[in-house]
Image (cartoon, rainbow, N blue to C red):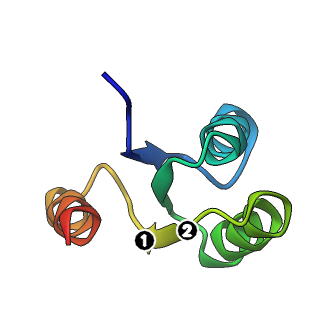
Amino acid sequence: MKIKSGIIIGASKGIGKELSQAFAQNKINLTLAARSKNKLKNTEKEIYLTTKTNIQTVITDIANYNDVKILIKKHLH
């Protein structure tokens, strides 16, 4: 089964950022989630410049149920 898209939380730094880069290099469409808008947008730009993969970003606090619902809804549409 080939993965076509995915959600990565904590995508603005550390392991989340590295996973985002790795998946994008494999042309997987991503929805990146993190709490920091500026860091997340920077990550999006960095990844797009190196991979030309479509990336969507959603500011998300995974401790907040409504934020998680919004994240999933945006990813699916």
Residue type at mark 1 is Val
In the rendered image, the vertical position of residue 29 relative to residue 8, given as above or below: below
Residue 59 location (% of width, % of height): 45, 71
In the rendered image, the vertical position of residue 2 relative to residue 20, given as above or below: above
Tell which of 13 and 22 is nearer to you: 22
Identify the residue at image location x=68%, y=31%: 15
Name the image quarter holding residue 58. bottom left
Q: Quadrant of the N terminus?
A: top left
Q: Secondary structure at mark 1?
A: strand
State the separation of the CA atoms marked 2 and 1: 14 Å
Q: Is residue 28 left or right of residue 44?
A: left
Residue assigned mark 1: 58
Q: Residues within 10 Å of mark 1 (few under 14, many from 20)?
A: many
Q: Is residue 49 left or right of residue 27?
A: right
Residue 73 location (% of width, % of height): 16, 67
Identify the residue at image location x=15%, y=56%: 65
Q: Is residue 16 left or right of residue 45?
A: left
Q: Residues within 10 Å of mark 2 (few under 14, many from 20)?
A: some
Identify the residue at image location x=46%, y=46%: 9
Q: Secondary structure at mark 2?
A: loop
Residue type at mark 2 is Asn
Residue assigned mark 2: 54
Q: Quadrant of the C terminus?
A: bottom left
- Residue most toward the top? 1
Depth-wise, is mark 2 or mark 1 nearer the camera? 2
Q: Is residue 18 left or right of residue 4?
A: right
Residue 32 location (% of width, % of height): 50, 58
Labelled pair 2, 1 in contact (Cβ < 8 Å) = no
Identify the residue at image location x=38%, y=59%: 61
Name the image quarter holding residue 36. bottom right
Residue 68 location (% of width, % of height): 22, 57
